[in-house]
Image (cartoon, helix red, strand yellow):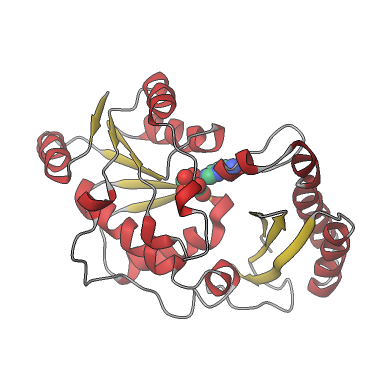
Amino acid sequence: MKIVKSIDELRKDLKGYKLEGKSIGLVPTMGFLHEGHASLIRKARAENDIVVVSDFINPIQFGPKEDLKIYPRDLESDSKLCEDIGVDFIFAPEASEMYHDRKTFVDIEDMSNNLCGAKRPGHFRGVCTVCTKLFNITGADRAYFGQKDAQQVAIIKKVVFDLNIPIEIIPCPIVREDDGLALSSRNTYLSKEERKAALCLSKAIFKGEDLAKSGSSVSEVLSKMKEIISSEKLARIDYISAVDLSTMEDAKDFDGDRLVAIAVFIGKTRLIDNFIYRR
Ligand code: AMP
């Protein structure tokens, strides 16, 4: 496994493999890797000749008051996890390698007006820009994304379609702790008490999914989920919404594929979770 910090070097290395007709799988991450990331990396390993994991805390997807400065990082332990799975390249550039004198961004209309897009202005512009750059730098055949960030998956799929980027986007299921909490690098911010409180997210998600499957309406599902989260005193709801899975527009019914997504502050830590309802 090779850790590469330069765009040119990675390009050169991967070009050789492309010329040999080898397939490349890319797993974009911000590092501090856990089992959620590992599940994406294993799938990429199983489906491609060459696996590239990008390990880059993308500054332009953070708002001015967000946690960019304290976002956890540990390239050494990330390298070990990647080495164990059999990754070929970790791409871990400095921010200055990815961005200098930037004037061009990739942005998406409408689909970023809701959910995290509404609560984190500029976030998806940063995500779309960095992902497009990573797709161009690696020339990967497939890129693996977690459904934990379901709006991100929908948006990246649309960017790839609209801009004719020759890459297949592969969504992967949410990996959870045994007690239900969705794995996240941000879980490390939680105190012991907050960690317990954070279970209100998965409880609300599981209950909401049950209700949706058994025929409850969108408003019944959302109000039960709100009730579960509001009963936890350390929790503050940022949003709870049901949207159309492909357009990300508000949905009033379950007459189609839906994403039911939540963002909740546990103390100062903002966590997200969701379920997908397919008709
Ligand atoms: P991040 O490092 O948080 O930007 O995440 C990198 C990728 O890992 C994204 O595609 C996430 O959706 C995915 N991911 C993060 N947490 C999980 C999880 N608990 N289950 C599945 N995928 C995840």
Q: Is residue 146 above or below residue 74?
A: below
Quarter where residue 9 is shown: top left
Quarter where residue 262 is shown: bottom right
Task: From the viewer's side, name the closer residue of 136 and 215.
Answer: 136
Q: Residue at 55% across / 32% down in the picture?
A: 35
Task: From the viewer's side, name the closer residue of 27 and 213.
Answer: 27
- The x, y position of residue 256, in whole percent, is 66, 70
- The x, y position of residue 264, in whole percent, is 70, 59
Quarter where residue 273 is shown: bottom right
- The x, y position of residue 75, in whole percent, is 38, 31
Relative to 132, 7 lies left or right: left
Q: Residue at 37% across / 53% down in the picture?
A: 58
Is residue 172 in view?
no
Q: Is residue 3 above or below residue 173?
A: above
Relative to 41, 219 lies left or right: right
Q: Is residue 107 above or below residue 16?
A: below
- The x, y position of residue 149, in whole percent, is 54, 55
Q: Residue at 57% across / 67% down in the picture?
A: 116
Q: Quadrant of the N terminus?
A: top left
Is residue 155 in view?
yes
Q: Residue at 25% across / 38% down in the picture?
A: 23
Q: Quadrant of the C terminus?
A: bottom right
